[in-house]
Every structure is written in C-alpha cells, then in structure tokens.
Amino acid sequence: MLAAYSGATRLILAVAALSAFAQPAAASAATCESLMSDLNTWFVKQPQGQGTYQVLTRITVLRSDGRYAGYVEGPSSGTTASYAGVLTYHPSSAPKFGLPFPAYLQDPATPAGTTRGLSAYFSDRRYTTCTGTCLIAPEFPFNARATDRQGVQIQLQDSFNIVSRTSVPAGTVTFTLYSWGNAQYTMSGNQCTVNGDGKGGIVYGFLSTGSGDTELIALSLNESFAPPVRLQ
C-alpha cells in the first residue's frame, strides 16, 4: 500500500510540476519606476540605430457606477500598427527656475487643420444598422460615429511640483479631454507591470473625476521602432 501511495504521489507531483511549467509567468505588480526608466533609456540610447522611436498605447476604462466602459486608441484615419495610439518622447530639460522638467510621453500634435488626440469610444453610445423604420434594430456598444478626442501624457521620471509642493512620481498619467474644453484629470500613485520581453508593459490605477464616480484605467505601452525611409 505504501509503495502504491508513493508511486501515486510521485505521479501527481510530476503532473503538477509539468502543469506549472506550462503556465505562462504572470507579470508582477510594482511601482512604475522600473517601466518608466526602461522606456526613457530606450529613447535616450536608441539601441536600434537611426529611425523613428515611439510608444504605442491602448487605454481601457471601467467606471465604478457602471454607467459605461471606455476604450481609447489611435484616430480612425490613422495608419499606425493596428490603430494603436501613438505617444512621442519629450526629453527632460532644465527650465529657467532651475528645477529639472521630467521626460514624458504625449500624444503628438497633428497637422494643422486636424483635431489633436486619440479616439475615445464609450459603451453607452450605441450603434445600430437601422437607418429608417425598422421592426428589428439590434444595437451594439462603442459607436464609431460618436467618439471624443482625448490626449494623454505619461511622466517618465520623478519630479517636484513647486505650486503644490508635492513630489510627482514617475508613471503619473494626465488626460486632456479635447472634446470637453481641454479639461484635465491626473492619475498618480499608479502600479505597473513590465513585459517579459522588456519592450513595454501596463500602467493601471484609479482616477476620481470629482463627479462621485471612480474609474479604473489601464494603459498598454509598447515600444515601436521604424527604420528611416530610404529613397530608391
């Protein structure tokens, strides 16, 4: 009986070990210093040589009051990979009053005459294929004809706000609502995960808009490099 039990035990342990080996390793939550530092170093050193260095992002939003979920990506007329939103790099600088201004990522300015920002979709803005009187008119969330324009800025280094006299940690995210008079909201004290390939990660945290609800927001950040275009 003992021999049989030992054999069965060894088999169970072996199966468990194989199952654990087969499971992908989950990224651990941490402060955003590591992810932000990696991204900043990538932009500064440009390890792939001359070319265009950018970060691609997608953003998801879930409200605590359950009114809607949100999704943000690049503009509908964009040509970036899979319509991900593009964030460009701004290196750190020292302003006149002596305090260093941190490096950051931000949605780039668009050509003159076009609207700046990423496209924000909302699940409570419904889409239907019915254009007239319909007996059956199914509706679907995230109407592409009813989007907002949203900007995003992500701080890559710690800094100090001389107005509020508070430190601002790396990974702080500021959203600009271009469709709503350029109102701004800031997420601070966020958590991050780093991709296993070291080429980006996820920033996530909570944002209170002051209207009584809390939003859980997650942003994916992925490095994107394009070599320079060479004329034939």
Image: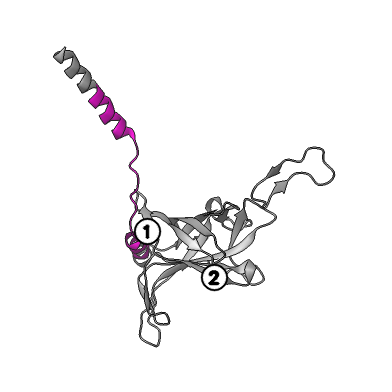
Please tell me which residue is depicted at 19% across the width and 17% down the height of the picture.
5
Tell me the SS state at disc 2: strand
Residue reaching furthest to the right: 133
Q: Nearer the viewer, mark 2 or mark 1?
A: 2
Please tell me which residue is depicted at 27% across the width and 28% down the height of the picture.
16
User: Of marks 2 and 1, which one's residue comes earlier in the chain?
Assistant: 1
Can residue 57 be spotted in the picture? Answer: no
Q: Quadrant of the N terminus?
A: top left
Q: Position of residue 82 (x, y in %)?
A: 54, 50
Here the colouring is: one colour
The amino acid type of the residue labelled 1 equals Gln
Q: Nearer the viewer, residue 149 or 42?
A: 149
Q: Position of residue 231 (x, y in %)?
A: 52, 61
> Is residue 131 left or right of 163 when viewed as pictured?
right
Can residue 135 be spotted in the picture? Answer: yes
Residue 184 image label:
2
Q: Which residues are magenta?
A: 12-41
Residue reaching furthest to the left: 2
- Please check the rendered image and state whether residue 3 is part of the magenta-colored stretch, yes or no: no
| Magenta highlight: main SS | helix
Please tell me which residue is depicted at 58% across the width and 71% down the height of the picture.
183
Number of other residues with Cα within 10 Å of mark 2, as a class: few under 14, some 14 to 19, many 20 or more: some
Location of mark 1 (residue): 48
> Is residue 203 left or right of 73 when viewed as pictured?
left
The amino acid type of the residue labelled 2 equals Gln
Q: Position of residue 46 (x, y in %)?
A: 37, 63
Tell me the SS state at disc 1: loop
- Please check the rendered image and state whether residue 25 is part of the magenta-colored stretch, yes or no: yes
Q: Nearer the viewer, residue 163 or 223?
A: 163
Q: Nearer the viewer, residue 110 or 149?
A: 149
Residue 157 in which image quadrant: bottom left
